[in-house]
Image (spheres, rainbow, N blue to C red):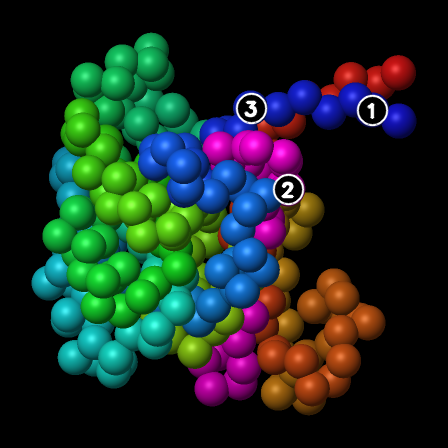
Amino acid sequence: MNDVETGEHVGTHMDAPAHFCRGKWHVNDIPPERLIGPAVMVDIRYKASLDTPDVNVTLEDLQNWEMQYGRIPDGAVVFMCSGWYEHYDNETIYKGNDVGDLSDYHFPGFDPEGAQWLFEERKAIGVGSDSPSTDYGASQTFPSHLIICGHDAFGLENVKNTCLLPPNGAMAYVFPIKSDGGSGGPTRVMAVWGDEHPTTSTPAPEGSNEDLTTTARGNDNQDKATCGASSIPEEFPCVLIGLMMTAQINLRWY
Ligand SMILES: [Zn+2]
């Protein structure tokens, strides 16, 4: 057996409302119905690049999403797809520098105007960034963190594989470690969806450590066992992906 020791805000993790808002829910206080909701994927890869890391999911991006896909459902978990998770193993690129200089961080996030609208007008239960933070790296005041917690919502950070989600039609399941009084914690994030949104992703290479599982129950040519969860009932949606980075959790054998 191991003892487990971990920071709360490492790897793929949740910022519970109490992280930035005094008196709001700690991670163990968040009710289950605020951890499961429709997944919305907003693709901002068109503007996020190594030369332009300081970009955001803006109100305009969200409104453009609605023009294409319809109204964002109430109670959604809105994921940013900037593609930034691809740089997770290179801290200099992923954060902007590898010396912990917060004044020189550069990566995408959610801008406050868009976040405000999501929580006020669309009653989102949370957002997920595929970068280190829900506020973009250049922020020094973390306005989106304050908006998120002010609406009893959660922020997910370092979420991987967000760009494998369909824009709409998936359900997100968000399972943070339930630590008593925690301001957040490592979080397993999953999304499932059905035949109508076949993934266009390339599956993880053989033997890779990707937390990624795909199957296609609608396709008879696919071996159903490839979903890696053969105990899932037949009627379960056909695609299941994991959105968690390998966690940086220290285990101590005893
Ligand atoms: Zn955090």
Q: Position of residue 108 (x, y in %)?
A: 24, 41
Q: Examine the structure image and report whether residue 191 is included in the region drawn in magenta.
A: yes
Question: Mark 2 touching mark 1, by CB under 8 A?
Answer: no
In the depicted view, which residue is nearer to us: 79 or 106?
79
Name which residue type carries label 3: Gly
From the image, tell me which residue sits under label 3.
7
* Residue shown at the point (33%, 11%) measured from the top left: 99
Residue 146 is left or right of residue 190, and the answer is: left
Farthest residue in the top direction? 99
* Residue shown at the point (76%, 74%) measured from the top left: 232
Above or below residue 96? Residue 170 is below
Residue 133 is left or right of residue 53, and the answer is: right
From the image, tell me which residue sits under label 1.
2
Q: Position of residue 54 (x, y in %)?
A: 16, 37
* Residue shown at the point (32%, 22%) measured from the top left: 92
Tell me the CA gap for discs 2 and 1: 18 Å
Above or below residue 172? Residue 253 is above
Which secondary structure, mark 1?
strand
Above or below residue 243? Residue 240 is below
Disc 2 or disc 1, which is closer to the eye? 2
* Residue shown at the point (19%, 55%) measured from the top left: 116
First in residue order: circle 3 vs circle 2: 3
In the rendered structure, find residue 178 and report the number of the disc placed on it. 2
Name which residue type carries label 1: Asn
Q: Residues within 10 Å of mark 2 (few under 14, many from 20)?
A: some
